[in-house]
Image (cartoon, rainbow, N blue to C red):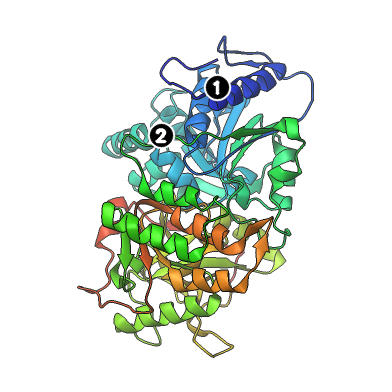
Amino acid sequence: MTLPALTFSHDQADAFDRIAEALAEAGINLVEATTAPARDGKSRVLAVIGKAGSGKTLLLSALAEACEAAGLAVVSGDYEPKRARERRSLAILAPTNKAASVLRLRGVRATTIHRILYTPVYDPEYEKVAEWLEGQGERPVVEGLTDEAMDRAKLFYEGNKSIPGALAVAGLRGSDFITGWKRRDDPLDVGFVDEASMLDEKQFSDLCEIFPNLIIFGDPAQLAPVGQSGQMVFETLPAPARLELSRIHRQEADNPILDLAHLLADPQVDFYRFERMIEEAAQRDERVVWAQRVEAELMARSPVLVWRNATRIRLINAFRNVHDAPEDALLPGEPLICDGIELPLKHRKKRQDLEARGLIKGAQVIYLGPGAKPGFSRLHVVGAENPQVSAASIVKIEKPDQEEPFIPYAARMGATFLHGAAVTIHKAQGSQWPAVQVFAPDIYAASRAGRVEAGQPLWKRLAYVAITRAENRLLWVVRNRLSRPEGPLGIADLRAKEVAPLELTQPEAEGL
């Protein structure tokens, strides 16, 4: 089967038909666009596997559209109307906010795995507004919300499909309409998971518990999660459950970045030959740059990708020095990476709150300034649907040749952050940026180390992941130098995305 508006390649069409057949066994008929109640209780897991440019996202989008046409309710992790709970459901997931935002920019209603594991509990008064925004009820009258505020919320929702964002535009804070978070008790129906190469065994197990029909999409050439012996979860599935996309789909104008990524599959290409290929591509196409230095201005929103931790720390400190950042404070506009949540077990609800709002390990954020309370920071969560949050923060800045990091901000507990001007290629998986800087001396060091991962030289896996993070422009940095920025750090580029910040406060969470 092919969708009328799309032209699939043979491998895409075969994968679509195999998934449609599996869903038909579960009572979801994509051909007739009909659904029947779930009945057989059987679990189904399929994996769509393909390298960058093979059409995984196009196939995922077409399947999601077909599922919605068949009557499945899309569960976004924001608000689930009661009527939708009685319907067959679909959730489209990614491991991180940035990966989910890449899908949303392509018209796919994606959210993070955490937002499905933990669901919000709404104030009953605002459930009426949420139901109205979803088209499930009449326009309510709510004390404190004017007609103008309701109109703003409706207009925002029509363009963004986000209940919390719409309520924030109406002038409400998260604590006004979300009273708490709970672990999902009831299973859902169909789950599509992008960037499956990032999944660890625990996440995969949790997803299998929630979704009796699970379809995961992954790239076998990427890096496996740390601690899994180079193996990705889809590699453990039996051969009939792995659907491979082998054809590479080019854009209307050939993409030199994808071309370089796929040249790495040639066993005759060593590091030296690959660098010559990059240099030749840079002479032909402005989308590939043979760079003599790291661009400091680009680091503020797109981290330099490195292999070695020591390189990451040196680049971060060089970035702060060139911006004249003080030792004891952050400048508005400095990038951070969430390194986890430091909370005791008694504050489990607060942990769920932080994670559900996007502050999960690996999340990219921009520091906006100090919060209203001591120890709090105002943050912009990159890729989140409602990016502005205020949270208790522990910020660690590592120093070269020093075991202990410098801590300019230290709440007693809360979300912990490392600086994000440079990140390891492992942590960059699942993210994409318009322009990406790859620190080539680190790739060279990996090639000299001679390590092999899952039958492939490690340097090739690192190079493949790093360069495929670039959407439009790849800068291959060959010298250990840093340019001076043309202007100071700032947050003006984030202003257009601002809504009322979601204050992460909770009475029982003393000190947060």
- Residue type beneath disc 2: Gly
- Residue type beneath disc 1: Ala
Seen from this angle, which residue lies furthest right? 41
| Residue 245: x %, y % from top left | 57, 34
| Residue 178: x %, y % from top left | 52, 47
Q: Is residue 298 left or right of residue 56?
A: left
**The image quarter in which residue 440 lies:** bottom left
Q: Nearer the viewer, residue 324 or 61?
A: 61
Residue 185 visible from this viewpoint: no
Q: Nearer the viewer, residue 233 or 373?
A: 233
Marks 2 and 1 close (CB-CB < 8 Å): no
Q: Give the residue pinned by disc 1.
A: 13
Q: Nearer the viewer, residue 270 or 295?
A: 270
Q: Estimate how packed mark 2 is, as few (under 14), some (14 to 19) or many (20 or more) residues with alpha carbons within 10 Å.
A: few
Helix, strand or loop under label 2: loop
**Residue at horizontal 43 percent and vertical 21 percent from the top:** 6
**Residue at horizontal 42 percent and vertical 78 percent from the top:** 315
In this rendering, the label closer to the viewer, 2 or 1: 1
The mark found on residue 395 in the picture is: none
Seen from this angle, which residue lies furthest bottom? 401
Seen from this angle, which residue lies furthest top? 32
Name the quarter where the C terminus is drawn: bottom right
**Residue at horizontal 48 percent and vertical 36 percent from the top:** 248
Q: Is residue 412 left or right of residue 347?
A: left
Q: Give the residue pinned by disc 2.
A: 107
Residue 477 visible from this viewpoint: yes
Could you tell which of marks 2 and 1 lies nearer the N-terminus? Answer: 1
Q: Find the distance from the CA under tag 2 to the CA under tag 1.
A: 21 Å
Name the quarter where the N terminus is drawn: top right
Count of marks, rendered view: 2
